[in-house]
Amino acid sequence: MKVNTLILKDFRNYEGVEIQPGSGMNVFIGSNAQGKTNIIEALHLCGVGRSHRTSKDEEMIRWEQPFGRVTVRSSQQDGTHEVTIILARGQKKKKNIKIGERKAERIGELFGHICGVLFSPEDLLIVKGGPAERRRFLDMLLSQLSSVYFYHLQRYNKALSERNAVLREISIKPGLRSTLDMWDEMLADSGAAVAERRIEAIEHLSALAALEHRHLTGEKEELTLRYMTSLRDPSDLRQKFLDQLFSARDDDIRRQTTGYGVHRDDISIRINNRETRIFGSQGQQRSAVLSLKMAQLAYMAESKGENPILLLDDVMSELDMNRRRALGERINQIQTFVTCTDISDLGETERGMLYQVDKGTLNSFPQ
């Protein structure tokens, strides 16, 4: 896919700007706090409906303005797509999402129109952080490729919240115990669908990441991924899920929370069969994350039949010369948006359009 137009109106520190990015590398350069990352954030927002920097919509609206707006127009194999997200100030107001001229009733309708892979320094948490970071990485990938997956995930999280609320109330209202059967059924239905899709995706991602990692490290190390779940047998996941929820019910009531389910699963990331989070050096952890992101790129390209866009938020300066070169070779045919403070951060990477960013204004010129 290719982003043809990006329009910002009262978004972060941009009063109003419109750009037509090039089909290759688009570099946004400037000092800190000038608005470079805001461009990346706007594109990511139109792809997944949320910021990678904040959970508060108001923080994305320009100071003292009631609304902020982002529009992205793209072209894909199936035609042109336009996504507009309108942000409103005030806690009771939710973001308004438009796909073309139609208002989206559910956020899941957004997925697939602007497909992208985001790589930022915070992504080191995929390796170094807790299981929630790794689940979020996988869920974001699969949600962009399948609205059905996203709906199963939403349904699961809603059922989990309701079941936990019941568990907290049972000591006061014992009669509520009988309602757990209903929530267990809903958790098992959606949880089995989520687990099945995650297991399948990790098997494929592991093979792709291993190839990317060998290219990055010169075949000196082996990177492997494994989905960690108590559902070891892939047959009849739903019934196994139900059985475990039922057998753990008394423990859940005592702890007042659901101790079993896909919300507890994890992804093991290993280099040479050693857990990278624990035993990996800083360099190995960076290589693992970069390999994961490149595997994500390849996975999405295979699934969609075309490349997604790539968003690199201030990561080039974090990579050594060899990693920069490997990354540059890998993204040669992909529309890429890069932020940096110095053009030398790009090393030998081929450049396309260069945008000078200064206090919410952009000046562009080709390289």
Image (cartoon, rainbow, N blue to C red):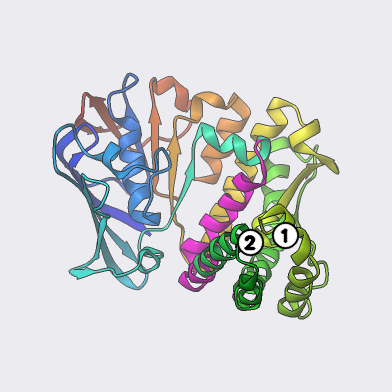
Please determine whether, in this image, residue 179 is positioned above or below residue 80: below
Residue stretch rendered in magenta on the structure = 129-153
**Secondary structure type for disc 1:** helix
192 displayed left or right of 143 = right
Residue at left offset 81%, top offset 69%: 247
Residue at left offset 71%, top offset 78%: 238
Dot 2 amino acid type: Leu
User: x%, y% of residue 258?
Assistant: 67, 59
Query: Which sits in the foreground, 155 or 249?
Result: 249
User: x%, y% of residue 351?
Assistant: 38, 35
Q: Which quadrant, please, contains the N terminus?
A: bottom left
Q: Where does label 1 land, which residue?
A: 252
3D distance between C-alphas at marks 1 and 2: 7 Å
Which is more N-terminal, label 2 or label 1?
2
Residue at left offset 71%, top offset 51%: 267
User: x%, y% of residue 260?
Assistant: 72, 60
